[in-house]
Image (spheres, coloured by chain):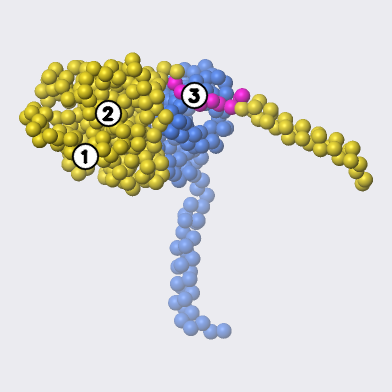
Chain colours: A yellow, B blue
Amino acid sequence: METSRRTFLKLGGVCALGLGSLGVLDGFAKAAQPKYVANPQALSAKRWAMAIDMKKCWEKGASGCKDCLLACHSTHNVPDIGTRKEEIKWIWEEKYENVFPGQESGMEPEAIREKPFIVLCNHCKNAPCTRVCPTQATFKRADGITMMDYHRCIGCRYCMAGCPYGARSFNFRDPRGYIKTELNPSFPTRDRGVVEKCNFCDERLAAGKIPACVEACKCKALSFGDLEDPDSDVRKALASTFSIRRKPELGTEPGVYYII
Amino acid sequence: MKIYDGKYILVGLVIFIALATFPVWVNHGRAVPPPEPKLDTPVIKQMIHKQCVLPKEEMITEHMKLLNIWRTQVVRDGKRMYVASDGKTYEMSLQNECVRCHSNKSQFCDQCHNYAGLQQGTTPYCWNCHIAPKENK
């Protein structure tokens, strides 16, 4: 068949039109597709952070008060294995020398050296754990939370080696039998062979609630909020007094500040 | 033709074939009943429109893919709400949302999973971490 230049160009034009309309059809098809959206009640921030006022905790809190620890553990079904090696840590107590090594003057008041500090995952800006994770099971969210995806964790424990704060714990055994608090049926447990840690209560933030530990503290020693919002609780707590962070020399930029 | 030790070989062969085909002739004529996932939970009974997040046929074949997408959206992208094509909004949570209607795990999930040979502890291992609904047995 003989094809003239004219018919060839006509056919070409029709083809180009057809291909061009694919995008439009795609758009129509997408309109009917299900959508994934964030909960409208969710709290949001540019960078979530926490300030822990140890002075308030020691002075106003009852001695031996573990409200924040218990609130966290019962919210997240954190097991109590009972041995130091297999301890699962989300939020726990530590001595000054272990919290701020290299920052001690050696001449601190007895009280500071002996009293327990509250420690948890620092949700570092430059989190070493997320850099070493081979499966990206742990990763940084846009709002600054260092998140764990337990589905992806292969239990290699590189993150535990990478974390300078010991904020990660490995499940050497099935934790189900060791949950001493009342089981929270709306939050999962973990499985043997995964690493776990504090998640800054991301599931509570998504429902418009502040973290469980902050809510549980009766003497308001913990404040939580957006570090980049000058009106947030955490910024107000930090604006009035001097604060320090753990191991600043490592450049991890922790998101947990201490007022002593 | 002569087979050396033919007696023993033939007897051995007969025993071997009998043993190898044991599952075939033992199960012959006995059909395993097909799974019947039950939809008679109190919540579903009260529903006027008995409709899951997707049409039934799609849910049967695609629920595992849907759960994978939900997982990614919730854990990695921080999006927790699913707007279905009929405009209804659901929380993307196996433990809090799916189970709200399908509170009969052993009569619903396990029916097909056991039939298909997906035993507990292998795949799907959803319930190793996610807390299964309490059932009255």
Task: Out of A240 and B8, give the one closest to the viewer.
Answer: A240
For disc 2, the marked residue is: A256
Give how far across and how far down residue B39 sits, in percent: 47, 27
Q: Is residue A202 magenta?
A: no
Dot 3: element: strand
Q: Where is the C terminus of chain A found, in terms of image quarters?
A: top left
Indicate the chain on which mark 3 is placed: A
Q: Residue at x 37, y 40 (%)?
A: A130
Vertical relation: A61 (above or below) B16: above
Indicate the chain on which mark 2 is placed: A
In the picture, residue B80 is in which quadrant? Answer: top left
Q: Residue at x 36, y 45 (%)?
A: A132
Amino acid type shown at disc 1: Glu
Q: Is there any visible trace of residue A74 in the rendered image? A: no
Neighbor class of circle 2 (other Cα within 10 Å; few <14, some 14-19, many 20+) is many
Amino acid type shown at disc 3: Val
Q: N-terminal of the two: label 2 or label 1?
A: 1
Give how far across and how far down residue A160 sits, in percent: 29, 43
In the picture, residue A252 is in which quadrant? Answer: top left
Q: Are marks 2 and 1 in contact (CB under 8 Å)?
A: no
Please report the bounds of the magenta region as a residue range: A31-39
For disc 1, the marked residue is: A87
- Tally the numbered discs: 3
Q: Residue at x 55, y 37 (%)?
A: B61
Instruction: Give the number of the mark in front: 3 or 2.
Output: 2
For disc 3, the marked residue is: A37
Q: CA distance from mark 1 to mark 3?
A: 36 Å
Q: Residue at x 45, y 31 (%)?
A: B77
